[in-house]
Amino acid sequence: MKLGEKNFMYAADPSAEVFNNKVYVYCSHDQDTAVGYSTMQDYLVLETEDMKNWVNHGVVLKPREYNWAHGQMNAPDVAYKDGWYYFYFPYDKTHIGVAKSRSPIGPWEEAVSDKITTIFDPTVFVDDDGQAYIYGSDSKVNIGDKGRHVMGAKLKDNMIELDGPWYRLSEEQVNEAVHCFKRNGNYYFMGRKGWRTGYWMSDSPLPTKNYAKFMGYITKEQKDAPVHMSAIEFKNDWYFFYQRGDVNEGTFHRRSACFEKMNFNGDGTIQEIEYTLNN
């Protein structure tokens, strides 16, 4: 969606998910006049069934309407389990709240009445066996070793409680924006390192005995907006979602969600992402 189109909104921190043979992209919302991130206060969703024609559902969740959720609301994620969609959203930057719905676009109701944990940029992954995990970075919280690393923990079956402690999963430090996906038995962890997307690989969703292996970078430097990403497989193709501040008359604080094709080498490593959008 581009500036000038009906109901245009600046959509940041794109978290793409595939539900019911459709793609849903859950985004934080930059205000049209934003000069910082403190005005981020609600979430919107974009939907497509062909990666060409998009439906903008606009703002679907306003956590500040809950009397316990307040402050800055950055990168979200949504996961599905046992008939419910769970919307994980940060408030006060690092407190994680949860709403739930029977539909991927809502309406959303409170699933909790307080934070379920504290982490930065949460992402939730449900494995093939139904076990759910939550990931993030300890960039702005003190829950692990000194520094900022990829962090992970199990979720209970109810999807709103941790099932054990947080674990450090990377030897290397990461700035923020952790994301997890699985392909051909390999677990991939992405994150912002400097102004690029780096990634790790592991044969475990919680590589606690041996850290996930850092594989390098898959994007060029991107200083027009903080690096934030997600990845999905849809109709036998893989897609990489990210954000830019140099399109739609945007800025570092008025970002737009974008996507590119993502390709893999024979050994499972990821090929460098090519940005095809010209400003």
Image: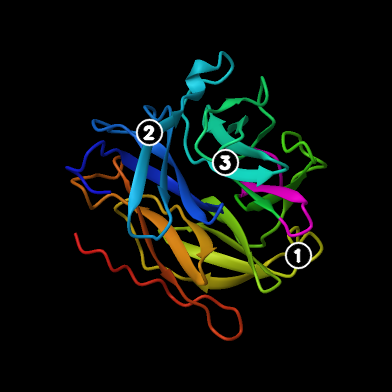
Which one is earlier in the sequence, the residue at label 3 or at label 1?
Answer: 3
| Mark 1 burial class by Cα count in 10 Å: few <14, some 14-19, many 20+ | some
Q: Position of residue 124 (x, y in %)?
A: 64, 47
- Quadrant (top left/top right/bottom left/bottom right) for the C terminus: bottom left
Principal SS element in the magenta part? loop
Q: Is residue 146 magenta?
A: yes
Category of crowding for the residue at label 3, using alpha-carbon neighbours closer than 10 angstroms: few (below 14), some (14–19), many (at least 20): many
Q: Earlier in the sequence, mark 2 or mark 3?
A: 2
Which of labels 3 and 1 is toward the front?
Answer: 1
Q: Amino acid at mark 2?
A: Tyr
> Which residue is located at x 26 percent, y 64 percent?
277
Report the residue at 49% width, 68% height from top: 238
Q: Is residue 32 left or right of residue 89?
A: left
57, 154: nearer the viewer: 57
What distance separates the C-alpha of mark 3 from that of mark 1?
A: 22 Å
Sooner in the amino-acid sequence: mark 1 or mark 2: 2
Q: Is residue 186 above or below residue 13?
A: below
- The stretch of residues the image draws in magenta is 127-147
Could you say which quadrant of the image residue 45 lies in?
top left
Q: Which residue is mark 2?
A: 37
Relative to 99, does residue 55 appear above or below in the rendering? Answer: below
Where residue 186 appears, as percent x and y from the top left, is 68, 71
Decide if residue 56 is in sight here. Answer: yes
Check disc 3 and report the residue beneath it: 120
Query: At 44% across and 48% down in the image, what residue appears?
Result: 14
Instruction: Please tell me whether mark 3 sits on a helix, a strand or a loop.
Output: strand
The residue labelled by disc 1 is 204
Q: Locate residue 272, reporting x and y percent.
A: 43, 75
Along the line of sight, which residue is nearer the eye, 19 or 39? 19
What is the spatial separation of the Cα atoms under label 1 and label 2, in whole angstroms? 34 Å
What amino acid type is highlighted by mark number 3? Phe
Q: Residue furthest bottom?
A: 266
